[in-house]
Image (tube, rainbow, N blue to C red):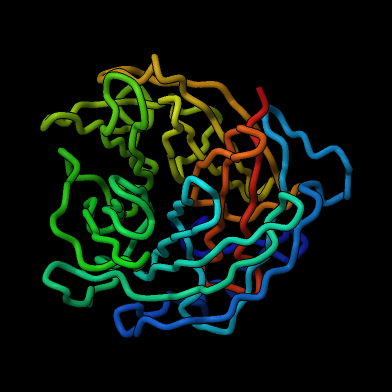
Amino acid sequence: MPLSKSFKLTAVAVPLVLVGGIALAFAKPNASRLTTEALTIRAAPIRSFSKSGDDDDRIGRLRFRGGLVLRTTHTAFGGFSGLEISPDGKQLLAVSDAGAWLKAKLQYRNGRPAGLHNAVLGPILALGNKRLQRGRDRDAEALRLLTGDLKSGIVLVGFEANQRIGYFKLRSGRIHSPSRYLRPPVRLGRNKGIEATGVLRAGPRKGAIVAFAERTLDRNGHHRGWLWHRGKVLPLALTNVAGFDITDIAGAIDGSLYVLERRFRWSEGVKMRIRRIAAKRLKPGAVLSGEIMMVADLGSEIDNMEGLAIHRDAKSKRTVLTVISDDNFNSFLQRTILLQFDVLS
């Protein structure tokens, strides 16, 4: 979801009146008209997470591995809100809130992200291999691998406006038409639908689907979520700490759940936060809190971070978190950036 209805942010140095006026001129492309095609993506390295160039890249319980600023001339490139990475960290799949998917090979140099190659962009489809004609049907906000791998498997795509989670087939790494949809057990408000979708990777509820809404709070002020397991849908809640919105969740191989969050205020700009919820806490009906792993603001190389993926580094055996930003198709004020972090023990 955009930071606000009338504001897209890159730097607070731009006068706010100017920002608001320019932002209104940008609109999402109609991805239903896309043809599946290869594209070239230029990648500029982000060498330090701190904009001051501080050599200490440890932030909280994470260490910055590296990042990329991604650019291309294709008008449908951007708006990435859901992300998945293969277990070896080399294959990337993303979805945008304009209704497109992106697959690419993620290359490394000295253990740091170096570029995206063999990139292909295509449209997210509807049932029966049809096109998603309405903009509200294309509002994809989450992506998660359910079964198989990123070449041949099933991925879940969560949609916010027309609230549903689709089961989509993967063939040769490309997203094809869905077979069916899940829907939340309650009707959520406008622009308050499903924002984050995850799958539990271990524990007694291995394979369960977890989803959270954005800006939809229960009567106790907690973020509302649900867990689908063995044919049942059960409630979950996540504590609302300091007014951050949930933008994505991802399950780790130890059964824990990582939560990517974002906060925007006119007075402070945008912030990013990551929480970790231990596997033993993930029980139906639970009010989850978790450990805050990191918090970053505009003193760091962040933007509107919306997609989160997890893999494990084969050499170090560390859990690696990859996050991607939604630039709201506003390349004048925002960036599509990809960041990676090691989880420290």
Toward the viewer: 170 or 47? 170
Q: Quadrant of residue 117?
A: bottom right
Quarter of the picture holding the C terminus = top right
Residue 312 at what x, y percent from top left? 55, 38
Toward the viewer: 316 or 225? 316
Residue 334 in view, yes or no: no
Residue 128 in view, yes or no: yes
Residue at image coords 51%, 64%: 6
Quarter of the picture holding the N terminus = bottom left
Residue at image coords 19%, 26%: 234
Q: Residue furthest front?
A: 315
Toward the viewer: 310 or 5? 310
In the rendered image of this protein, does residue 216 appear above or below residue 241? Answer: below
In the rendered image of this protein, does residue 67 appear above or below residue 77? Answer: above
Toward the viewer: 216 or 133? 133
Residue at image coords 43%, 39%: 249
Number of marks drawn: 0
Please give left or right for residue 266 compared with residue 180 in the image: right
In the rendered image of this protein, does residue 243 appear above or below residue 149? Answer: above
Residue 266 at what x, y percent from top left? 63, 51
Please give left or right for residue 281 compared with residue 74 in the image: left
Residue 255 at what x, y percent from top left? 41, 25
Residue at image coords 75%, 48%: 300
